[in-house]
Amino acid sequence: QQQQQKQNQQKQADCQIVADGFKVANGITADPSKRHVYVADANDHCIHVFDRNADDGSLIRTNVVSLTHSPDNVEYDVGSGKLTTSASAFTYQVIRRMLGDSSVKVAGGMSTVEFLPDGSFQVEEVLMHDGSKLSLVSSAVFVHGLILLGSPPSDGVLMCPIPEQ
């Protein structure tokens, strides 16, 4: 009974909304200093950039980075100082796959966002593939000079070399 009471207490946290206006907020990360927070919005094909107030935790939207593809999840890569996100090319394919049509091979890959000293940013499509080996990519990270891609409906993780520029 004590365990049940403890679980109920944990579920009743005093939470507050600190950011809104998303269509599908599907990935959140922060830079190492925790002063900047990034939210991937899959349906709007963008990443929202926030400054975080260290005193009260509130978020102030400072920028919106438009992307070519739908981002799913977002990571801050400490080695490069860039954001990495998975990229799904065709939303209609994603919907069909998520509704259970396993015959649909959803193209996907990785995009990065680099914030430049002048306050602007550079978006790069690092890698895209046709979905034949891993369909519906939902996470993408750099690991020791390689790219790892993951997907909920696919059985495995795809490892790819970083393409030459």
Image: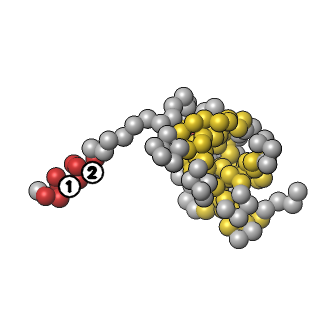
Query: In this orientation, which residue lies closer to the viewer: 80 or 85?
Result: 80
163 in relation to 24, above or below: below
- Picture residue at 88% right of the left edge, 57% below the top: 165
Of the residues shown, which amino acid type is indicated by label 1? Lys
- Image coords of residue 156 (percent x, y): 58, 62
Of the residues shown, which amino acid type is indicated by label 2? Gln
Mark sitting on residue 6: 1
138 in relation to 99, above or below: below
- Estimate the spatial distance between the alpha carbons at disc 2 and disc 1, rounded to whole Å: 6 Å
Considering every residue shown, the one lying at the far front of the view is 55
Query: In this orientation, which residue lies closer to the viewer: 62 or 164?
Result: 62
Binning the other alpha carbons within 10 Å of mark 2 as few (below 14), some (14 to 19) or many (20 upward) gives: few
- Image coords of residue 123 (percent x, y): 77, 45
Mark sitting on residue 10: 2
- Image coords of residue 140 (percent x, y): 65, 55
Considering every residue shown, the one lying at the far left of the view is 1
SS of the residue at dot 2? Answer: helix
Considering every residue shown, the one lying at the far bottom of the view is 144
> Seen in the image, is 37 located left or right of residue 58?
right
SS of the residue at dot 1? Answer: helix
- Looking at the figure, which quarter contains the N terminus? bottom left
Query: In this orientation, which residue lies closer to the viewer: 48 or 55?
Result: 55
- Residue 56 visible from this viewpoint: yes
- Residue 150 visible from this viewpoint: no
